[in-house]
Image (cartoon, grey):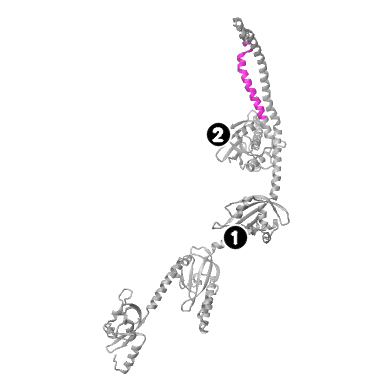
Amino acid sequence: MKSDDSKNGLYGRLFDQNIDMMMIVNPDDFSIVDVNNAAMSFYGYNREEFRQLRWTDLVDMSPTGFIDSVNLHREGHPRKQCRHLLKTGEIRDVELRISHIAGVTGKLLFIMIDDITDRCREDAAMKHKLGMLELMIDTLPNPIFCKDRNGRYVLCNGAFEKFFGRKRESIYGLSTKDLIPGDENSQYHAQDMEMIRDCEEQISQSFLRNIPHSDIEYYLKNREPIEYELPLRNAEGKIRDILVRKDIYVDPRQQAGIIGILFDVTDRNQKEEELRMLHTALECTPELIVTMDFNWKATFINNSFTALLGYRLEEINHEDSNLKGMFTELLPESDIYLITCGINWQVLEGEGNFTTKDGRHIPVSFRLTPIIDATDEYKGILAIMTDMREVIREKEQKRLVELQLRQAQKLEAIGHLAAGIAHELNTPIQFVGDNINFLNDTFNDFIALFRDCSERLGKEDNAKEITQEEASAIREKFEEIDFEYLAAEIPAAFEQSQDGIKRISDIVRAMKEFSHPGSGERGAIDINKAIMNTVTIARNEWKYVAEVKLELDKEMPMVPCYEGEFKQVILNILVNAAHAIGDVVKTGDSSTKGEIIITTRADRQWAYIDIADTGAGIPEKCRNKVFDPFFTTKEPGRGTGQGLAISYDVIVNKHHGKIDFETKEGKGTVFHLCLPME
């Protein structure tokens, strides 16, 4: 450049006084030809110092600041960024705008330099913030997304990728209708575009009308996010209920976009459906359901409560004492205290009368359960009540019928057994009488013998020796009464008499206990002994047609049961077995008896009693009816059909045990009884 050229002088003044930094560089050796005042002020060098420097002396040669100087004059790269060193040693970020100019010696590089250090720092800070923001968004469990002004995805997090099973790189640039195929999903893309157009229209109007930017911010802050649910198929191919919540955002370039988040509400919807079903069930159940707080204020009552007692929810809470009064009359004060204070309690049960709105008294049973939330905090009370009127009537009727049937069946059994029992009593009475007559006769013979011996021996104070003749006479007396025979038979007669008396006593006692209605108390008994006594009473029923074998466990423990009713069950089955065998004996060889085998055993849980017979078995068509009341296969006058029905009720309903049978036609039947040990 020639400083004395008027044109160049004008250009030189423009060059020097320009507020933008300018520099002219020789591309051959990168020497600095000239700089303007702005550049000298920025770098800290004067013009003479600059002319001693090369372009490369200004460039930060560290890996983060190095720039390939050869590329300065390469065509197609008019803008470049690099880092320059100032005279003070400070490093600044600069942007270069390079053009070619003609010089005296050839082409020169005209470089305009912009200090972009602050902008770079802001960009770096923004990138850092964006990086942190993306990291934070990626850690969130809910899928999150952003869309640009064209409704296309520009950002999403890891949860979004996972849900759709696609990498974000393949998602970016797609719209909702691209990502979620289906004609019904096109409406959501149209909705996005409508939201964006509405927002950009507000922004456009704000510029045209010179509306403050704060009004736009107010518009954005006071918009209600759009929410809707739709079914979406996830990466696993499962349909999930998704709640979409989306809203508008505006970027620094005043362009609108969409930001949104997805919530998987499948489980919530299922729980809500379960709650709706539960509410419907509670409303429809015949039980009376009430929930209340610890002050006895009702929060829910079902239709059954209102129908039976006449109160609606607002009425039951009209007086604070209504519900409390209903329950406090039926519970002890200690339980009321536990409930009111919320002290740890589980379930309280009771029965009593509730008073209806019109003053009637209704018998109910109730159960009170504490309502505890997830934090173990006591929230209130759940009350479940049952109308007991019909239950009480049915129970009383059933009790009376069962009592009458059992007593009638006992008396019927006693009536059938009466003749046999009389015969059983007659036999021991007869041999007891014969033994007494025998003992009476022998006693007279012994008295005569003792008197004769006493006379021959003399009195104690005047004893004399027995002569040979007297001894011979005494021996003759012994031979006359057959002393050896009597010495063997008299003890046997006593033993037989004692046994006979015991048998008579046992039969009488067993009959008395069997015919008594019973105390209704359950106690531990020796079931082996109970079985033997029952077999004894029924002896006349089976002794002509069968042999009874008792295979009773000698280690059998005591079993808790109702003794009288247990004996009645054994008698019913034993008599049925005897009748079944009797029917077989009648049609066959009368000299051949059948067999009844009774066995017992036990484990920790159950006592087992099996009664097997060699009768004809139960016909197949009758097997499902044997426990039905009034069902019998016997001819009229021989059976009422109550024996096995009562036996089933006693074992199953009263003892909570089990009864069943195995049978084969022509072979016999085995009844299995199981009684719980506890």
User: Which span of residues is magenta-colored?
Assistant: 478-507
Q: Residue furthest bottom?
A: 6
Image quarter of the C terminus: top right
Instruction: Tell me if I can see residue 147 in this picture.
Output: yes
Q: Please tell me whether residue 606 is drawn above or below residue 6 in the rendered image.
A: above
From the top left corner, tell me how far across and down residue 454 is, in percent.
63, 10
Left/right placement of residue 385 relative to residue 51 reads right
Disc 2 secondary structure class? loop
> Which residue type carries mark 1?
Leu
Residue 289 sits in quarter: bottom right
Counting from the top left corner in percent of width and height, residue 95 is at: 36, 80
* Residue plotted at (61% across, 59% down): 277
State yes or no: residue 99 in magenta. no
User: At x 59% / y 5%, what residue is drawn?
Assistant: 468
- The CA distance from mark 2 to mark 1 is 56 Å
The answer to which quarter of the image holds residue 29 is bottom left
SS assignment at label 1: helix
Q: Residues within 10 Å of mark 1 (few under 14, many from 20)?
A: few
Query: What's the residue type where badge 2 is placed?
Result: Glu
Q: Which mark is residue 555?
A: 2
Q: Is residue 499 magenta?
A: yes
Question: Residue 646 or 612: which is nearer the viewer?
Answer: 646
Q: Which mark is residue 23?
A: none
Closest to the observer, 434 or 4: 4
Snapshot quadrant of residue 184: bottom right
Q: Earlier in the sequence, mark 2 or mark 1?
A: 1
Visible in this render: residue 540?
Answer: no
Q: Is residue 566 above or below residue 225?
A: above
Image quadrant in which the N terminus is located: bottom left
Read off the residue under disc 1: 275
Which residue is located at x 48 percent, y 75 percent?
Answer: 148
Residue 429 is situated, as x and y percent measured from the top left of the image, at 68, 24
